[in-house]
Image (cartoon, rainbow, N blue to C red):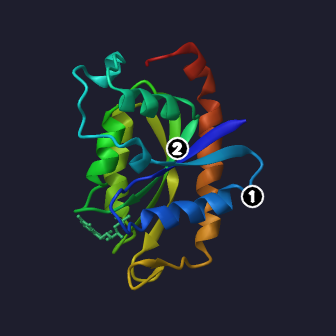
Amino acid sequence: MIKIAIIIGSTRPGRNSESVARWFYEIARKRNDAEFEVVDIADFNLPLLDEPTPPSMGQYTKEHTKSWSAKIASFDGYVFVTPEYNHATTGALKNAIDYLYNEWNNKAAGFVSFGSTGGTRAVENLRLIMGELQVADVRSQVALSLFTDFENFSVFKPADHHEQSVNTMLDQVIAWSGALKPLRQNDVGA
Ligand SMILES: Cc1cc2nc3c(=O)[nH]c(=O)nc-3n(C[C@H](O)[C@H](O)[C@H](O)COP(=O)(O)O)c2cc1C
């Protein structure tokens, strides 16, 4: 069975990303073509990258890196839940992504974003990063508005139509996660 991580992309107290990720998970878990797990980067207590060698060499020295590596390596694909911070993704998510390399390679990813304009600039920022990590990022995304999908910018009340977008995006992420499996088995280009 394909395994997909739903990654919570912000860490501040009172963050909205956690309720968005939990909502996404509740829709995803109704499917029977993949298994889903919410992965909270806050649980890994990653400091600003503190490994002496670049992650592509896979020579990890810190326990937090080894735990994060084992968790991310265990999935076939990812859904990144990201707010928009200054027209990009969060520093915390970028830092967590930067910790690893091979663990991401030849997998698929989709995005759930939120912000004043649906967090779309954060996703464009992530798409650039995905290219370098050899992650196939799918076209469909879930873009949530701070004005219409949240009350007072803090209580998540998504419009019903987003459920369809969740499933369209997951159709693509699951298909590509499966299609890339032979490359992962042969360790091509990693
Ligand atoms: C440092 C910072 C920068 C932000 N920059 C943007 C921005 O550029 N565009 C936007 O639409 N919202 C921006 N916002 C608003 C966030 O999208 C909104 O606060 C969101 O709830 C943050 O996600 P979080 O609650 O999971 O931390 C910013 C918020 C923070 C904290």
The location of residue 6, given as percent across then percent down, is 54, 50
Circle 1 Cα neighbour tier, 10 Å, few/some/many (<14 / 14–19 / ≥20): few
**Which quarter is ligand 1 in?**
bottom left
Left or right position of 94 against 171: left
Instruction: Using the rendered view, name the quadrant where residue 132 is placed.
Output: top left
Residue shown at 63% from the left, 68% from the top: 163
The location of residue 136, given as percent across then percent down, is 48, 38
- According to the image, label 1 marks what residue? 30
Q: Which quarter of the image is occupied by the N terminus?
A: top right
Instruction: Using the rendered view, name the quadrant where residue 14 is placed.
Output: bottom left
Q: Which quarter of the image is occupied by the C terminus?
A: top left
The location of residue 78, given as percent across then percent down, is 52, 43
**Callout 2: helix, strand or loop?**
strand
Ligand 1 has an atom within 8 Å of the beta carbon of the residue at disc 1: no
Residue 108 is labelled as none
> For this rendering, which residue is in front, 131 or 8?
8
Residue 45 seen by the camera = yes
Q: Farthest residue to the bottom: give it.
A: 152
Q: Is residue 142 above or below residue 69?
A: below
Left or right position of 176 against 67: right
Residue shown at 40% from the left, 41% from the top: 44
Q: Farthest residue to the right: give it.
A: 32
Q: Is residue 149 above or below residue 173?
A: below
Residue 78 is labelled as 2
Ligand 1 has an atom within 8 Å of the beta carbon of the residue at disc 2: no
Residue shown at 75% from the left, 45% from the top: 33
Mark 2 to mark 1 CA distance (whole Å)? 17 Å
> For this rendering, which residue is in front, 34 or 19?
19
The amino acid at mark 1 is: Lys
**Callout 1: helix, strand or loop?**
loop
Residue 100 seen by the camera = no
